[in-house]
Each structure stands twice: as structure tokens, then as C-alpha cells.
């Protein structure tokens, strides 16, 4: 009660208001203070996790050119930019209610009666048409809520941008793997054709049965089918990259093989502290959603109290246009009104309860975002810690299968082994080579996944959209010095305030 009286007194003195929003208190991190440890995890406790731009992780100039084109032409990213622009404009719409509304009007009339001279009347009026005294901070909290939603939308745009870069890198790497798989299918088909010719010759000489020929033809047909499938996969891979880029691109920017990709995707080391997750744009978005929900509570609480509005009018009136601005033509008036709801069946208090429940949900989403981020990073680290051994094992298996296939074929040609043994060796070699490519691709995908899971590239703002974009990103939110900066209670971003008039206020209950 004392706080409410103080709020009323300060508000009446300053024609301003107090905030009834609760203080935003971020919960303790719901994840362990460090990454999991054990045989499956790669530990590098001597180095903190780096914050790199995509150019520091994806070092191939061809991939960088594709990323730059995607940051300009991708339609999902353009949509995200437009959403940021709309959210920023909505802040100004909501904030305008905190200021007086000024208006002006003019009237002219003429009256004439029989036997008398006509009279012309002129009037000009201007003044404050509406101004609500924000004694309880309803309007200020509404503005604060929209401001935090705008910042959450900016973080969402960064999430789209990060996902776009990661997806493009994955598509680029997958194309290189498909080129390798096509080469494997072509080699297998060539060997199968040789086997068919050899078996036909042995059949004609009465050395081999017809079943050997039919089995060789099956292997050839399967390899030719694999060639057709891989050509389809390559065409679809190009289509996927074209969609991500947002237009046509130079085919010379595509990799020739997976071995062309792997060295250009830099592995990121693991750090000690899991606080790095607070850089992730989805976590930042959830935090600003939580702050917006807190401000909504303050606005809902303020609706429990009366609303006071002021109006004022200044005017000039004259029956002759030349005397409109004479001293005697001037008049003024002022007024005010207060409205208070006596009974609404608990609707306004229920509105406060709704806002508080939405705040609790936003808090749970914030904690869930951190936990999800931790799980994604930990999963990527678990794969990264063991993938080198898997690659070595897959390579050794492929080498052994190739040697087995060569020896078995020689033994078959020499009449020592059966043709079935030779076919089995060829099938094993084909499967081993495909498995080796899949494991090598997993190594690259894990590095990309770790870059994305850590919220990489937070230090670099996205490129401006192309000339065909109708809604360019607001520079102060997307590319400015406050890009991705976390706003703790009481902190602000001066550069953002200077650029757009927005203020990240102190979330306190004091006036």
C-alpha cells in the first residue's frame, strides 16, 4: 500500500508513471557447468570455445561465395528481415500512445437573411485531442513488451541466418559425397561388365554354368541402377543448393569430391563452460520473450486502476477573415476525465493471471532452449570425439575389401574359387566403399552441426538483402553494434538508443 501511494505521488508530480511489472530475474542455468566427459567426448579444457564467423569455419572460397549469395538472395532470410522491420515499426506504434495527440481543424460558414448583410464565420482550432496520464505504467510497459519482442524477432532472424549457412554447407558437402558415390557406382558397373564378358566366354567354352552369367548380369544391372540413382541425387543436390542460394549459381563452385570438402571445414574445439550457449540466437530470443512477458504483467496490472486522460483546445474565431488573428478572437479550454471500471466479473484480474501464466510459460521455454542447446552441443561433441576412429575403421575395411576382391577375382580366373565367392567379394567392396563415404560425410556434418549448435557466427552481421527485397533489414537491429548483445537487468545499448530511440530500461518496480 505504501508503494502504491508512493507510485501515485510520483506519477502525479511527474505526469509520468510507475511500472507495476515484476523485476526480470533469469533462472540459474538448467544445465551442468561443463560438457560431459568420458571416452566419447573430445576435451580441450585449455582453450575456450571460439566465436568465429562462417569464413573462419568454412574456408573454401567456393563455399564462401555461395554463402554470400544466399545471404543476399534466400527468400526465408528476406522474410526474417521483413519481420524485424515490422517488429521495429510496431514498437514505434505502441510507443506513440505515450505522447499527446495533437490535432487541428478549421471551419468556415456564411449566413444571409433577407434585408440584412451576409455574415461570414471563420474558426481555427488546434490542441491536444487526447493524452492519457500513464500513472501506473500501462503504456510504458506495453512499449517495453513490444521492444523486447522486436529484439526477440531480431534474434529469430539470426537463427534463420545461422540455419541457412549450416544447411548450405551440408548441401555442398553432400554434393561432394554424391560425386564420390557416382564414381563408385561407375567403377562397380565397369567391373561387372568385365565379369559378364568373362563369364560369357567361359560359358561358350563350357567351363562355366549359365547361372554364373545370370549372376554377373544381376551385378551389372544393380550397378547401372545405382549410377542412375546417383545422377538423380546430383541433380537434386544442385536444386537444393539453388533454392538455398535463391537463384542460379556457377556450377564451378560445386566440389568435385568429398575429399575436396573435408579439409575446408574446420573442426571447432570444445571448451569448458557451457555458458557459451547463451550466445545462441534461439536462447537470446527466448530471453527477450521472457522479458516481454514480464512487461505484459505490468501492463495487465495497470489496467486494474483508473485511467485519466487530458484534453486541451486553443482556438481562434472571427466573423471576418481579416480579424481571425486579432486578440479578441482567441479562446482556449482544457478538460480531463477519469474512468474506472466498477465491475467486470473479474475480467481484469483474470487478465493479470493470464499474463503471469504466459510469463511462466516463457520462463519454461527459456530454460528449455538452454537445455536443448546443451543437448545438441553435447551430441555433436560425442560424435566428434569418436568420429576419427570410425573413419580409420571404415578406411581399413574398404582397403581390405578391395584387396579381397582382387585376390578372389584372380583365384576365380585361375579356377580355384567359385564365381559366387567373386560376386560376394564385389558386393562387400561396393558396400565398404559406400560406408567409407558415409562416415567421412558424417565427420563433415558433425563439424557443421557443432558450428550451428554453438550459435556460431554471432559476431558477424548478415549481408544486406538484394535490390529486389522490399523490406531491407533495419541496420540498428540486424547489423548494428548491439547485434546479439544480451541485455541484463539495468543494462542498455546506447548505440541502439541513438539510432532508433529505443531504450532497454531497468526492469525494476521503482518509478
Image (cartoon, rainbow, N blue to C red):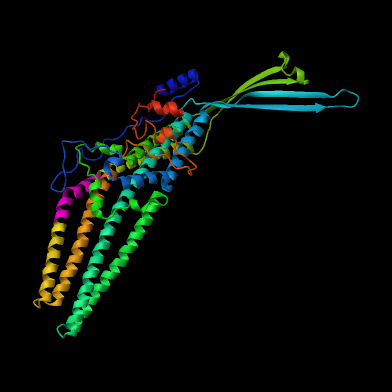
Q: Residue furthest right?
A: 115
Instruction: Reply yes or no: does residue 310 show up in magenta.
Output: no
Residue 33 is at least partly visible in this image: yes
Q: Is 6 or 315 nearer to us in this picture?
A: 315
Image location (x, y in percent) of residue 18: 44, 25
Q: Residue at x 76, y 18 (%)?
A: 322
Dividing the picture into quadrants, the one containing residue 231 is bottom left
Position above or below: 181 against 140: below
Position above or below: 72 against 335: below
Q: Residue at x 19, y 77 (%)?
A: 198
| Residue 487 in the figure: left or right of residue 272 | right
Quarter holding the C terminus?
A: top left
Image location (x, y in percent) of residue 1: 41, 24
Dividing the picture into quadrants, the one containing residue 438 is bottom left
| Residue 467 in the figure: left or right of residue 362 | right
Position above or below: 215 against 206: above
Q: Is 382 or 359 nearer to us in this picture?
A: 382
Residue 297 is at least partly visible in this image: no
Position above or below: 99 against 447: above
Image location (x, y in percent) of residue 82: 46, 41
Judged by its main secondary structure, the magenta piece is: helix
The stretch in magenta equals 376-392
Q: Residue at x 48, y 41 (%)?
A: 471
Image location (x, y in percent) of residue 507: 38, 28
Q: How many marks?
A: 0
Amino acid at each position: 500500500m505504501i508503494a502504491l501511494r508512493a507510485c501515485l505521488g510520483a506519477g502525479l508530480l511527474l505526469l509520468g508513471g510507475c511500472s507495476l511489472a515484476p523485476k526480470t530475474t533469469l533462472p540459474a542455468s538448467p544445465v551442468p557447468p561443463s560438457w560431459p566427459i568420458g571416452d566419447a567426448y573430445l576435451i580441450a579444457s585449455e582453450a575456450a570455445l571460439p566465436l568465429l564467423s562462417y569464413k573462419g569455419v568454412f574456408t573454401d572460397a567456393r563455399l564462401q561465395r555461395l554463402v554470400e549469395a544466399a545471404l543476399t538472395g534466400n527468400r526465408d532470410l528476406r522474410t526474417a528481415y521483413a519481420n524485424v522491420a515490422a517488429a521495429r515499426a510496431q514498437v514505434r506504434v505502441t510507443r506513440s500512445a505515450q505522447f499527446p495527440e495533437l490535432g487541428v481543424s478549421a471551419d468556415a460558414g456564411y449566413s444571409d437573411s433577407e434585408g440584412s448583410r451576409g455574415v461570414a464565420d471563420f474558426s481555427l482550432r488546434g490542441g491536444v485531442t487526447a493524452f492519457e496520464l500513464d500513472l501506473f505504467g500501462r503504456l510504458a510497459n506495453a512499449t517495453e513488451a513490444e521492444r523486447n519482442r522486436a529484439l526477440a524477432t531480431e534474434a529469430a532472424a539470426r537463427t534463420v541466418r545461422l540455419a541457412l549457412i549450416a544447411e548450405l554447407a551440408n548441401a555442398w558437402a553432400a554434393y561432394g559425397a554424391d560425386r564420390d558415390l557416382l564414381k563408385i557406382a561407375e567403377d562397380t558397373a565397369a567391373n561387372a561388365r568385365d565379369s559378364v564378358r568373362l563369364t560369357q566366354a567361359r560359358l561358350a567354352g563350357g567351363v562355366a554354368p549359365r547361372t554364373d552369367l545370370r549372376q554377373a548380369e544381376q551385378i551389372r544391372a544393380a550397378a547401372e541402377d545405382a549410377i542412375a540413382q546417383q545422377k538423380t541425387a546430383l541433380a537434386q543436390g544442385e536444386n537444393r543448393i539453388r533454392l538455398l542460394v535463391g537463384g542460379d549459381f556457377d556450377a564451378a563452385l560445386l566440389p568435385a569430391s568429398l575429399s575436396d570438402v573435408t579439409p575446408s571445414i574446420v573442426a571447432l574445439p570444445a571448451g569448458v563452460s557451457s555458458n557459451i550457449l547463451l550466445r545462441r540466437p534461439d536462447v537470446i530470443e527466448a530471453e527477450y520473450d521472457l522479458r516481454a512477458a514480464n512487461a505484459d504483467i505490468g501492463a495487465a496490472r495497470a489496467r486494474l486502476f483508473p485511467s485519466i486522460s487530458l484534453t486541451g483546445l486553443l482556438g481562434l474565431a472571427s466573423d471576418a477573415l481579416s480579424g481571425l488573428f486579432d486578440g479578441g478572437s482567441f479562446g482556449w479550454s482544457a478538460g480531463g476525465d477519469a474512468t474506472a471500471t466498477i465491475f467486470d466479473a473479474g475480467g481484469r484480474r483474470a487478465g493479470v493471471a493470464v499474463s503471469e501464466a504466459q510469463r511462466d510459460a516463457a520462463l519454461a521455454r527459456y530454460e528449455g532452449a538452454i537445455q536443448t542447446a546443451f543437448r545438441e552441443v553435447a551430441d555433436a561433441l560425442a560424435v566428434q570425439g569418436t568420429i576419427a576412429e570410425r573413419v580409420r575403421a571404415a578406411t581399413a575395411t574398404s582397403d581390405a575389401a578391395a584387396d579381397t576382391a582382387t585376390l578372389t577375382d584372380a583365384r576365380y580366373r585361375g579356377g580355384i574359387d567359385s564365381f559366387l565367392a567373386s560376386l560376394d567379394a564385389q558386393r562387400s567392396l561396393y558396400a565398404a566403399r559406400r560406408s567409407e563415404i558415409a562416415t567421412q560425410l558424417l565427420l563433415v556434418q558433425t563439424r557443421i552441426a557443432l558450428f550451428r549448435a554453438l550459435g556460431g557466427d554471432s559476431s558477424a552481421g548478415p549481408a544486406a538483402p538484394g535490390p529486389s527485397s522490399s523490406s531491407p533489414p533495419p541496420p540498428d537491429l540486424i547489423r548494428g553494434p548491439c547485434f546479439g548483445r544480451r541485455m541484463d537487468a539495468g543494462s542498455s545499448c546506447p548505440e541502439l538508443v541513438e539510432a532508433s530511440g529505443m531504450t532497454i530500461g531497468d526492469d525494476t518496480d521503482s518509478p
